[in-house]
Image (cartoon, rainbow, N blue to C red):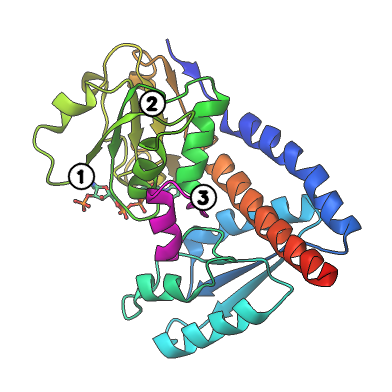
Amino acid sequence: MAKIIDGREIAAEIRGGLKPRTEKLKERGIIPGLAILLVGEHPGSLSYLREIEKGCDELGMYTDVVKLAQSVTQEKLERRIEELNQDNKFHGIIIQLPLPEHLDALRVGGTISPQKDVDGANPVNMGRLLLGEEAFVPSTAHGVHQLLIHSGNSPEGKHVVICGRSNIVGRPLMGILVQKQKDANATVTVCHTRTRDLPSITRQADILIVAIGRAEFITADMVKEGTIVIDVGVNQVEIPAGSGKFKLVGDVDFDAVKEKAGAITPVPGGVGPVTTAMLLTNVIKAAEVAADKIASRSLS
Ligand SMILES: NC(=O)c1ccc[n+]([C@@H]2O[C@H](COP(=O)([O-])OP(=O)(O)OC[C@H]3O[C@@H](n4cnc5c(N)ncnc54)[C@H](OP(=O)(O)O)[C@@H]3O)[C@@H](O)[C@H]2O)c1
């Protein structure tokens, strides 16, 4: 039976380490600030936004949700981002995805100043990540890496299979795990919808990370005995069908796979809370860099 990796406990540990950093910034007259851009209606994002706001409040950080109409043009959205880039109250800017189809998400991400790009949406940060340079990494990918480290499952030398190649999870995770660095150094296989015979690959994983958005898709026969399973998926399913009662489940058939895995994250309570903690970490990091810049300017 698998050990359950408690994401809430790990997130609390990470947030605990942030408190002294926000206090130090406060002594320097700086309150870390985060702007969250929300385009259109986002019923599915509300609980994530509440978690971010709660986390910011607890740490004495400033946060503001900037709402724009569903019909906003690319130019107007980019102009609003430019304004936020110039606004010293905000050290971090994130855009809640998905954006409406008429908007070019990559171009929007590229408008965020790389120094304020705390969710790694700017291709500059993705490029730096791949090159092994200091970069802002998308929070979910960063969170999965921290979950592995904090739960004592370093990916060093392991075969990590990632299911999903999105820009916010699969690709940046690959970028983190292949680096020639401590707690990386993994052999990484990335799977997607064109992968042939997926089960034969997932069964080779020492660590299996699943981010595909398909409810309970990974079944026990797709996992080898003792594998570490990280379930990124969040899917709302009606159980039982037609009942009008909804439940959140992951991309992994948790009840069956936990009997075979060495360790597994639950949904909810696994990757989600650590994602939020990593976003807060990045906002504080951005505020510290901004504070150091101001200090060095006043010295010169
Ligand atoms: N907990 C968190 O903090 C958090 C954060 C972000 C996302 N999520 C959740 O994670 C899941 C993935 O999100 P995302 O934004 O990364 O998804 P996405 O952009 O929809 O990408 C899904 C990826 O999975 C692949 N895929 C889909 N079905 C597959 C299948 N049957 N076999 C193999 N690969 C398959 C797709 O392949 P192709 O590229 O070939 O289409 C694609 O690369 C969702 O459930 C989302 O809600 C959770």
Q: Which residue is mark 1?
A: 192
| Lateral position of residue 151 relative to residue 23, left or right | left
> What kind of residue is marked 2?
Val
* Disc 1 residue: CB within 8 Å of ligand 1: yes
Q: Earlier in the sequence, mark 1 or mark 2?
A: 1
Q: Residue 229 bears which disc, if any?
A: 2
Q: SS at mark 2?
A: strand
Q: Please determine whether, in this image, residue 248 is positioned above or below residue 284.
A: above
Q: Residue at x 52, y 58 (%)?
A: 119
How crowded pointer 2 is (Cα within 10 Å; few <14, some 14-19, many 20+) is rated as many
Q: Residue at x 86, y 50 (%)?
A: 23
Q: SS at mark 1?
A: loop
| Lateral position of residue 196 relative to residue 124, left or right | left
Q: Which residue is mark 3?
A: 139
> What kind of residue is marked 1?
His
Number of marks in the image? 3
* Disc 3 residue: CB within 8 Å of ligand 1: yes
How crowded pointer 1 is (Cα within 10 Å; few <14, some 14-19, many 20+) is rated as some
Indicate the position of residue 194 as horizontal and vertical percent values: 12, 46
Tell me where residue 102 sits by quadrant. bottom left
Indicate the position of residue 62 as horizontal and vertical percent values: 75, 64
Indicate the position of residue 207 as horizontal and vertical percent values: 35, 25
Is residue 122 part of the magenta span, yes or no? yes
Is residue 123 part of the magenta span, yes or no? yes
Q: Nearer the viewer, residue 252 or 102?
A: 102
Q: Are marks 1 and 2 in contact (CB under 8 Å)?
A: no
Q: Which residues are magenta?
A: 121-138
Q: SS at mark 3?
A: helix
